[in-house]
């Protein structure tokens, strides 16, 4: 499966990192890396991720990362 991280998603990841950074700069980096790793795992095992309702026909999937 091909994984595409859109510009909007990249922007969201940057915002997440910037939100965490004032409290824990190192954790901001590792957390965003964990999210990117989770996305990369989608390519290897897409069935482990749920289809997004209303977008099943595009095979768009999602996953929750931690809490």
Image (cartoon, rainbow, N blue to C red):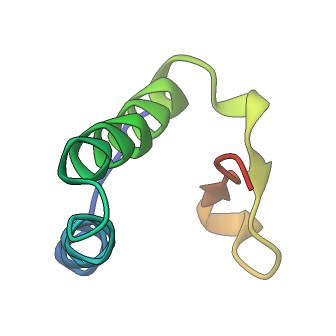
Task: Tell which residue pokes out farthest to the top in this image.
Answer: 44
Who's the residue at 27% across and 53% down the image?
A: 28
Q: Residue 1 at x, y = what percent?
A: 47, 31
Who's the residue at 70% across and 46% down the image?
A: 66
Number of labels in the image equals: 0
Between 48 and 54, which is closer to the camera in this rendering? 48
Between 26 and 32, which is closer to the camera in this rendering? 26
Who's the residue at 60% across and 60% down the image?
A: 60
Q: Residue 2 at x, y = what percent?
A: 37, 37
Q: Residue 6 at x, y = what percent?
A: 25, 68
Q: Is residue 25 left or right of residue 5?
A: left
Q: Residue 64 at x, y = what percent?
A: 70, 54
Who's the residue at 46% across and 27% down the image?
A: 43
Q: Is residue 7 above or below residue 13?
A: below
Snapshot quadrant of residue 3: top left
Placement of the C terminus among the 4 image quadrants: bottom right
Snapshot quadrant of residue 30: top left
Q: Is residue 50 left or right of residue 64?
A: right
Q: Is residue 58 above or below residue 63?
A: below
Q: Is residue 28 left or right of residue 40?
A: left
Task: Tell which residue pokes out farthest to the front in this image.
Answer: 23
Between 29 and 14, which is closer to the camera in this rendering? 29
């Amino acid at each position: 499966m091909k994984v595409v991280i859109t510009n909007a998603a990249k922007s969201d990841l940057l915002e997440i990192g910037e939100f965490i950074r004032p409290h824990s700069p190192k954790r901001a980096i590792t957390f965003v890396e964990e999210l990117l790793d989770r996305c990369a795992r989608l390519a290897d095992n897409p069935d482990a991720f749920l289809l997004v309702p209303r977008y099943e026909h595009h095979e768009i999937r999602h996953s929750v990362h931690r809490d």
